[in-house]
Image (tube, helix red, strand yellow):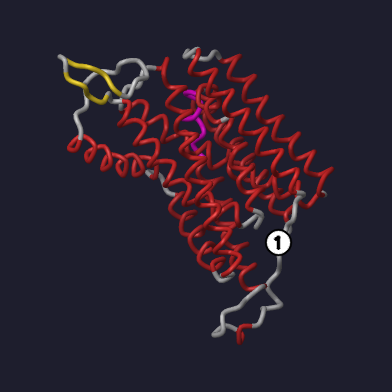
Amino acid sequence: MDLELPLWFEIGALVVLTLILVADLLIILKRPHIPSTRESTLWVVFYVVLALLFAGVMWLVAGGEFAGQFVAGWLTEYSLSIDNLFVFVLIMSQFSVPRRYQQEVLMVGIIVALVLRGIFILVGAAVIENFSPIFYLFGAFLVYTAIRQAFPGDHDDDAQRENFIVRLLRRGIDISDEYDGAKLRTTVDGKRMFTPMIIVFAAIGVTDLLFAFDSIPAIFGITESAFIVFTANIFALMGLRQLFFLLGDLLDRLRYLHYGIAFILAFIGVKLILHALHVNELPFLNGGEPIEWAPEISTWMSLGVIVASMAVATGASLIASRREHA
């Protein structure tokens, strides 16, 4: 389905979202601190409400199908972003980042993620428009990712991949042993050097790149609108920094979250394959004609599956944690 949102709405939305991101960054740079639970909660609620308001405006401007695709895409990206936090925790711990400066590190990671995903989205949209069989590849990749996600150890594997980048940095540039606030450069015994913060930024950037490979095909399984894909990513990432401090040790209690995410990825992967069959253009498959028996899964069914999967995974995790504690 080709989606066409009003141009004034797309431009206005991107301008407002950019201003919010810039304001958020300036607040962090002006007052680096460890946010309280109350502050983190208020910010997370603010961004969730903002996303829902945006969906409401989209409903009024363009209709329920558009709004439903945005909400489903936002929830998918949000759930994958929460999974991202597990690796962020490992990185912060591994490199002993002072908690006072973790907000800045996360904000830089979010900006890097937005840039990388923006590039991926433009490329993905262009490929989809000119080569519909890419849905077969996207679908198969998501099913493979879901199988990998369902087994423990993925987060440790991601950390090991990042260590390769870290080793390259250590060999190529001079890095000090101590942090100097949030600075990237410092002076040690009269010699200019990079601080360990450069390693942390590199590790966060690699993590963002790895997760972009998973998340972008997933959301293109929900909508083919590059604007909806990008705004869903923005809203999913905007509250990620505060969510990091809000969840804290609770992340370890969400032991079944990866199963919920795996099910969502597998579901979207199957949906993409069915969609590819429905619009089939491969000459060796049914003579290049669409396969009529292949069903199209609606946006609202996708939304229901995503919400139910995350609710079941979160509920099961908290119940298991409570029983273990008792």
- What kind of secondary structure does the magenta stretch mostly adopt? helix
Residue at left offset 35%, top offset 15%: 181
Above or below 321: residue 267 = below
Q: In this view, does 65 lie to the left or right of 215?
A: right
Query: Which of 249/97 is in front?
Result: 97
Locate residue 297, reporting x and y percent: 70, 61
Query: Which of 9/125 is in front?
Result: 9
Residue at left offset 40%, top offset 41%: 207
Magenta stretch: includes residue 255: yes
Query: In the rendered structure, which amino acid carries the disc numbered 1?
Result: Ile
SS for callout 1: loop
Residue at left offset 82%, top offset 45%: 61
Magenta stretch: includes residue 21: no
The residue carrying pointer 1 sits among few (fewer than 14), some (14 to 19) or many (20 or more) residues within 10 Å by Cα, namely some
Query: Which of 246/239 is in front?
Result: 239
Q: What stretch is highlighted in magenta?
A: 248-256
Mark 1 highlights which residue?
Answer: 297
Query: Which of 76/50 is in front?
Result: 50
Q: If the image is split into quadrants, where does the N terminus sit? A: bottom right
| Number of residue marks | 1
